[in-house]
Amino acid sequence: CKFLNANNMYKRALCCNLSRVVYKGTAPFSRDITAPSDTQYNFRTHRSIRCSWVRQTRFVRQSFMMEALVLYNSLGVAGKYFEDEKEFRLFITEKLKESFGNGNL
């Protein structure tokens, strides 16, 4: 089945929008608060994206940016290279189905 349930569709939208913000610079102010963290060792598997907000209030933790960052980092997508956005979307779709299942259609 190629369709996603509502929860996975929401998570896919979070990941795709965050990818556009961070790597394509579509939202300059949002891009300023996120920084791909370079680790001491240059391994693709250990990279993550961090938020530079100093104070982590409830409002910040429930914001689009923080929810997307937590999901993006938990899926381990931050260091991977994709040819284009279509390949990224297909990868995210399969990763979400693998991680969270796709029931209740």
Image (tube, helix red, strand yellow):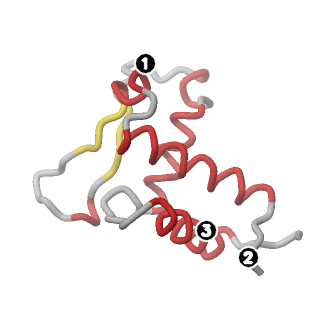
Asked if disc 1 and disc 2 are in contact, CB closer than 8 Å, the reply is no
Q: Is residue 64 above or below residue 87?
A: above
Q: How many marks?
A: 3
Asked if disc 3 and disc 1 are in contact, CB closer than 8 Å, the reply is no
**What residue appears at the point 56 percent right and 30 percent down from the top-left corner?**
61
Q: Is residue 20 above or below residue 4?
A: above
Q: Is residue 48 above or below residue 83?
A: above
Measure how far apart labels 1 and 2 are at the Cα level: 40 Å
Q: Residue furthest right?
A: 105
Q: Amino acid at mark 2?
A: Lys
User: Is 96 on the left-hand or right-hand side of 4?
Assistant: left
Q: In which quadrant will I find the C terminus?
A: bottom right
Q: Amino acid at mark 3?
A: Thr
User: Is 98 on the left-hand or right-hand side of 43?
Assistant: right
Q: Tag 1: Cα neighbours inside 10 Å, few (<14), some, or many (≥20)?
A: few
Q: Position of residue 40 (x, y in %)?
A: 11, 52
**What residue appears at the point 30 percent right and 36 percent down from the top-left corner?**
35
Q: State the residue in front, 35 or 83.
A: 83
**What residue appears at the point 48 percent right and 62 percent down from the top-left corner?**
75
Q: Position of residue 68 (x, y in %)?
A: 54, 43
Q: Describe the element under mark 2 as helix, strand or loop.
A: loop
Measure how far apart labels 2 and 3 are at the Cα level: 9 Å
Q: Which residue is mark 3?
A: 93
Q: Which residue is mark 1?
A: 55
Q: Position of residue 104 (x, y in %)?
A: 88, 69
Question: Does label 3 or label 1 sit earlier along the sequence?
Answer: 1
Q: Which residue is mark 2?
A: 2
User: Is 19 on the left-hand or right-hand side of 103?
Assistant: left
